[in-house]
Amino acid sequence: MKHFQLFATLLFLVSLQLFAQKIDNFSSYHKINDSSYFRFHYDNDYFTSTDENYTQGYSFEIVLQDLKKNPLNAFLLNDANASQQFGLSIDHIGYTPFNIGSTEIQFGDRPFASAIMLKSFKINTNAERKSRLISAIRLGLIGPGAFGKEMQVGIHEATGNTIPQGWKNQIKNDAVVNYEVIYQKEIFAIPRYFSFQYEASANLGTLNTNASAGIVAMAGLFNNPFSNKQNRKFQIYIYSKPQATFVGYDASLQGGLFNRKSPYTIASSNVERVVGQNHFGMVVQTKTLYFEYTTTDITKEFSSGTSASWGGIKIGFTF
């Protein structure tokens, strides 16, 4: 009952502003229990046979103990009783409307948009409390400078698909400065076989201003993500993370906070403030290698939009 009351309280506290994270490296089921690793993440709606909304994203992620000296860590949260991982990643995300072959603005649909960001993060894992505290700073750019057009056109030319023609109407250049905090807590577990958790996060900045809450279930053969012990050298498991979402601000829909000259944006009154989302996937890990496939389903993010889905892969290794 105590855990249920705490979870309900967290849901209430964040219910004013929840958001849907597109590139997610921080959920507990992504954990690599090592102080040094590299991981590549790639999302594409091609995996779900669509080509609209969140159309593509990728991330290059590196964790090194030497990054403890990163000066940005002074702004990140610390748990003195936790083990810590320090990392950097480069994230790129892109969005398109349904009719990518048209040169005209697709009124009532999502605007073309892309963003590129450098992310500095710290992961605190408290084995005694069975909790994780994560904080991150994202610095970057939304707009043509993020080369979303060049990325999508190049891929479509190489694969023989429809060449996107509407990128001239994309969200204009603006700064991305975001701060993110995530808290995860294990509620119930059958050691090595099952784990049930809650997750709450908040995000403040020029790309997204929001927060989120959800629950996580993991089942299979795995090391506990809230422990620093590696009892299994081989892990294989599935996971699911449903979450409720309330949106505060989304620059990929509404344009940048400072540059208001974008040719087309979604009005604030048309942004859906309540969004449902679920991540489902499978992970295989050895002592040195990491493989993951995930799918995500999300309800519509603006009043005239549609629900969407995409798939993603992660490949990583320790060193």
Image (tube, rainbow, N blue to C red):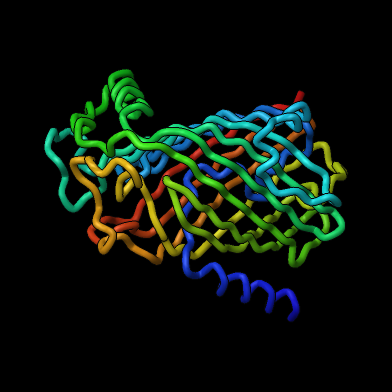
Q: Position of residue 13 (x, y in %)?
A: 57, 71
Task: State which quadrant residue 86 falls in.
Answer: top right
From the viewer's perspective, tell me whether residue 53 is left or right of residue 186: left
Q: Is residue 18 above or below residue 259?
A: below
Task: State which quadrant residue 292 falls in.
Answer: top right
- Taking the spot 72% from the left edge, 51% from the top edge, the residue there is 220
- Taking the spot 38% from the left edge, 40% from the top edge, the residue there is 45
Q: Position of residue 177 (x, y in %)?
A: 48, 41
287 and 116: which one is in front? 116
Q: Is residue 48 above or below residue 60?
A: below
136 and 113: which one is in front? 136
40 and 254: which one is in front? 254
- Taking the spot 69% from the left edge, 62% from the top edge, the residue there is 197
- Taking the spot 38% from the left edge, 59% from the top edge, the residue there is 299
Residue 185 appears in the picture as rendered: yes
Q: Is residue 46 above or below residue 242?
A: above
> The C terminus is located in which quarter?
top right
